[in-house]
Amino acid sequence: MTSDDAASEALRRAREMAAAPGFKKRKHRRRPEPGGIPGGPGLGNAGSGARPSDRDPQRLGEVADALMDVRGWREQLEVASVVGRWREIVGDAVADHTTIESFENGTLVLRATSTAWATQVKLLLGQLRTRIAADVGPDLVREIVILGPAGPSWKHGLRSVRGRGPRDTYG
């Protein structure tokens, strides 16, 4: 049997199966038009035409903004902006003596280098909130927590005695 004979035999069997009772022909469905409007302006099946279309190239900034809104990354980007520009927002003197510990759910936690600087930053909280609100918006930072310097932990091992521990302020 040659390849032409095999092909004609396969075609004959396919035709017999199609003519058999119970065989359903598949209906061809049209693909939905972009934008949901059949035959709408600039949205034909042939793709992009002379009119604006969803398939036209978009500006990168517009696409990035849309992606940040869809994914919910806008607030995280603003938080990163505050952390990255901390020295610019608060000034050199405060930035030299404070670091950002965390920034979650609108709460900014700062760690001061000494108890004196923690007190100083607490006195500057009003001005600090005003500067942050002016730079990134009023709703991003809802609370600012200022912590003093972290002293060494005196709890070692499985068992430790409760109480104040050493009586030094470490700062």
Image (spheres, grey):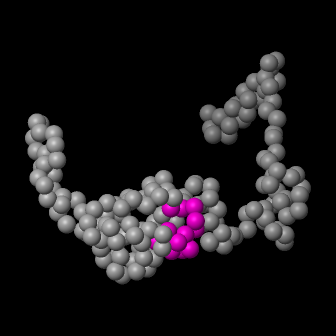
Q: Is residue 91 left or right of residue 154?
A: right
Would you say residue 5 is visible in this rendering? no
Q: Position of residue 149 (x, y in %)?
A: 24, 63
Residue at the extreme bottom of the image, as rendered: 92
Quarter of the image where one finds residue 134: bottom right
Q: In this figure, what is the number of numbered marks?
A: 0
Would you say residue 9 is visible in this rendering? yes
Seen from the viewer's position, the closer of residues 136 and 148 is: 148
- The residue that appears at 54% across and 62% down in the rendered structure is 140
For the N terminus, the quadrant is top right
Q: Is residue 3 left or right of residue 164?
A: right
Q: Is residue 86 left or right of residue 58?
A: left
For the C terminus, the quadrant is bottom left
Residue at the extreme top of the image, as rendered: 21
Q: Position of residue 129 (x, y in %)?
A: 49, 68
Quarter of the image where one finds residue 7: top right
Q: Which residues are magenta?
A: 128-141
Q: Quick check: is 40 in the magenta stretch? A: no
Residue 31 vertical position relative to residue 151 in the rendered view, above or below: above
- The residue that appears at 32% across and 67% down in the rendered structure is 119
- The residue that appears at 73% across and 33% down in the rendered structure is 11
- The residue that appears at 62% across and 55% down in the rendered structure is 70
Q: Position of residue 139 (x, y in %)?
A: 57, 61
Report the magenta stretch's main SS.
helix
Q: Is residue 132 left or right of residue 8?
A: left
Q: Position of residue 56 (x, y in %)?
A: 73, 68
Seen from the viewer's position, the closer of residues 98 and 3 is: 98
